[in-house]
Image (spheres, coloured by chain):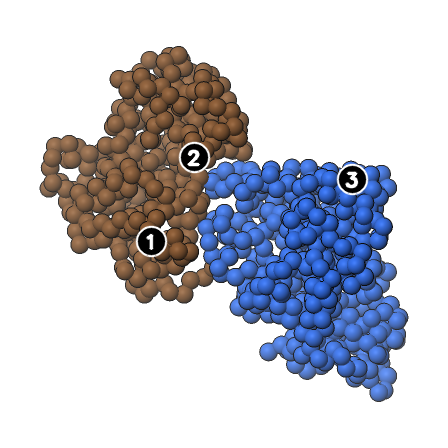
Chain colours: A brown, B blue
Amino acid sequence: MTDFLTDGEHAFSDCHLLTCEKLTAPQINSLLDAADMAAELSRRGEPHTPYLAGKTLINLFFEASTRTQSSFELAAKRLGGDVLNMNVSTSSVQKGETLIDTAMTLNAMRPDIIVVRHHAAGAVQLLSEKVDCSVVNAGDGAHQHPTQALLDALTIRREKGRVGGLTVAICGDIKHSRVARSNIDVLNALGANVRIIAPSTLMPSAPDRLGVTAFTDMWEGVKDADVVMMLRLQVERMGGTFVPSQREYFHVFGLDHDKLSHAKPDALIMHPGPMNRGVEIASTVADHPRSVIQEQVEMGVAIRMAVLASVARAPKSGDGALKNTPRY
Amino acid sequence: MPFFARPPDLATQPKPTVLINARLIDPDSGRDEPGGVLIEDGRILDLGTQFRRNAPSGYEVIDCQGHVLAPGLIDMQVFTGEPGAEHRETLHTASRAAAAGGVTTMIVMPDTKPVIDQVALVDFTLRRARDNAIVHIHPMAAMTMGLAGDEMTEIGLLKRAGAIAFSNGKHSVMNTRVMHQVLQYSRDFDALIAHFAEDANLAGAGSMNAGELATRLGLSGVPKEAETIILDRDLRLVQLTGARYHAPTLSCAESVTAIQRARAAGLKVTCGVSINHLALNENDVVPYRTFYKVRPPLRGEDDRAAMVRAVQNGDIDVIVSSHDPQDADTKRRPFAEAADGAVGLETMLSAAVRLHLNGDADLKVLLRAMTSGPADLLGLEGGRLLKGAVADLVVFDPQAPWVVNREDLSSRSKNSPFDEHKMQGRVLRTLVAGHTVYSYARTNDLNP
């Protein structure tokens, strides 16, 4: 068995992973190094150090997500952890229980890690303030999705050998995207040049304040890019409120061979999934030899192993007493 | 322990009282001098420097020990939970919070369950206030049925029943035709229309100021234009109808400019701001602090500073607490799902004094916007230190430092954005119609 976690003074050592906003380059690289090694061990079929042996992880998904939830589950199981998937659609949450009550109930079961996805920005942080265990953000509204950004950075680093200095164009529904926000934070921390491309209706306010260059013309935005990262466009946003039609969106902002030809010849094609083929990405581009979409999925498991192992061994802030008197 | 009067005391004749050794501040006349006030039958019988040291015999003497004696505050926007949400606040608990904050008259908003849109409900509010409250209460009635923005209420009858003004509460009337009709009709009764301006469609599901912070937090933003578009529309309708119009809680410099333009054109328009928008800005929201979630949302520092300047220049007539009690069920939620609103009756004066001590605005100007400003707008007596005026008074020490602890607030709800804030300026005594309804200390010695 080979340990993939290493100790370093500047390595990531928090007990929660809630946001990428304050992650430093050494912290990010420590997670990427660990995940890189974990990925290699998995590929070789070697057993992993059971970092989560005897520990319990609860997957608490208020929004349905097959791939992220399975990715966390698989990561935890490979490290010897027990996993409980909370099916929120049949739980007391549907009966009007508040997020805080749910958090406190789960906390009383004394899990070691809770992985949370919620439709409201800030909900995961709120939950983390009410529990004693580690909390990992698996997506909170339009705010953050840290493991997605880390797996994207790892994929880029493995393909290109570095992240710093590369031009990464993120294209699509930036306004509502937690993937975009997390990626902007991580890529900026690692020294990439980040561009965002979206129609003005899907551009967040004050994009110039995010440390990125904003484009509303995709041909211009992908020009000479090293990486083109496409975002999913939610079906409910296609109906004329944000963009007039799927057809027009694909024509102007969908990644097809013509637009791709403006990027560097060796540009990577990325997508966090699930894809809408023919909406934000042409089917043939999705299956292009330079598409690393499948590798992203593989790196997702690796990154989650690194994150879970890391938060599991971090010292907890609590004194072991249950937090049953919440402030509001 | 502070002292609160019990409600029935207000019905009795107060003892003849003299407050001596005070710094008299009457924001309307500009009076600021040492002196005292003589009270009989609930009214100011006399006042001036002659009562600085000398108390005439036969009067109960209160020594103000050099602290400020000013007209009691008039708070033009207070939300309570009575009727319908008494677990958050009743007229009684709100009136105690008011008394503790030096507020002697509060205007309660029609956003209750049921909505105050019927004569019987105005009457209910007035009777409940008479029996349970320790400060004066006047209800604002709804201008449209159920605040739905579709049908006008009985503005004439409601006014006769005691509705002091008309509001659509926390909702804007989005139908321009309805708004036009309300303004037209209200003019016949010289009724004041206090309309919260926010374009419901543009604001959408927004939960904070639009801009960089909202983008970083992944929250949907409310742009300033949601306010200015409706305000501009209303001002055009006022021009068309000649109605009396008040914009109760503005949040940005552009809105003040719109009001200035309308006044220059001779329109009868006035405006207000909440103390939250003078004392706090959008940075306070980070990270997802729901006690700072209010409507309109807290704006950037530039706008906050502009609103303070507008108060100082006299462009803003009224400061309100916009007291809005919310409990854990509505506030302890993810930011976008949490209710708007902050309690403020008890901290409004201190927060205003802090602005003064920071050198941002004159104390008299700030006080005017909480006394004679709203009194004139609403046609209320009070708000002034004058012979014959009702003896609604507050004694406060503008220097006294204190730290807000929400658990100590008199309000039934504890959602104060000033929790743990360091304040300066403490209310020592509040008198309503000559009765001491609140005293920081139990005795006539004002220092605890």
Viewer-side residue, A119 vs A270: A119
State the image coordinates of residue A324 (x, y, percent, origin top left): 37, 65
Task: Check the residue under mark 1 and report the chain it is in.
Answer: A
Instruction: Give the residue furthest to the bottom.
Output: B58
Task: Check the residue under mark 2 and report the chain it is in.
Answer: A
Residue drawn at (34%, 42%) of the image:
A64
SS for dot 3: helix
SS for dot 1: loop
Residue A28 appears left or right of B46: left
> Circle 2 sits on which residue?
A177
Viewer-side residue, A120 vs A43: A120
* Three-letter amino acid code at the position of disc 2: Ser
Mark 1–mark 2 distance (CA, rounded to whole Å): 27 Å
State the image coordinates of residue B189 (x, y, percent, origin top left): 84, 53
Mark 3–mark 1 distance (CA, rounded to whole Å): 51 Å
SS for dot 2: loop
Q: Residues within 10 Å of mark 1 (few under 14, many from 20)?
A: few
> Circle 1 sits on which residue?
A91
Q: Nearer the viewer, mark 1 or mark 2?
A: 1
* Three-letter amino acid code at the position of disc 3: Leu
Task: Check the residue under mark 3 and report the chain it is in.
Answer: B
**Quadrant where the N terminus of chain A is found in the figure:** top left
Sequence-first disc among 1 and 2:
1
* Three-letter amino acid code at the position of disc 1: Ser
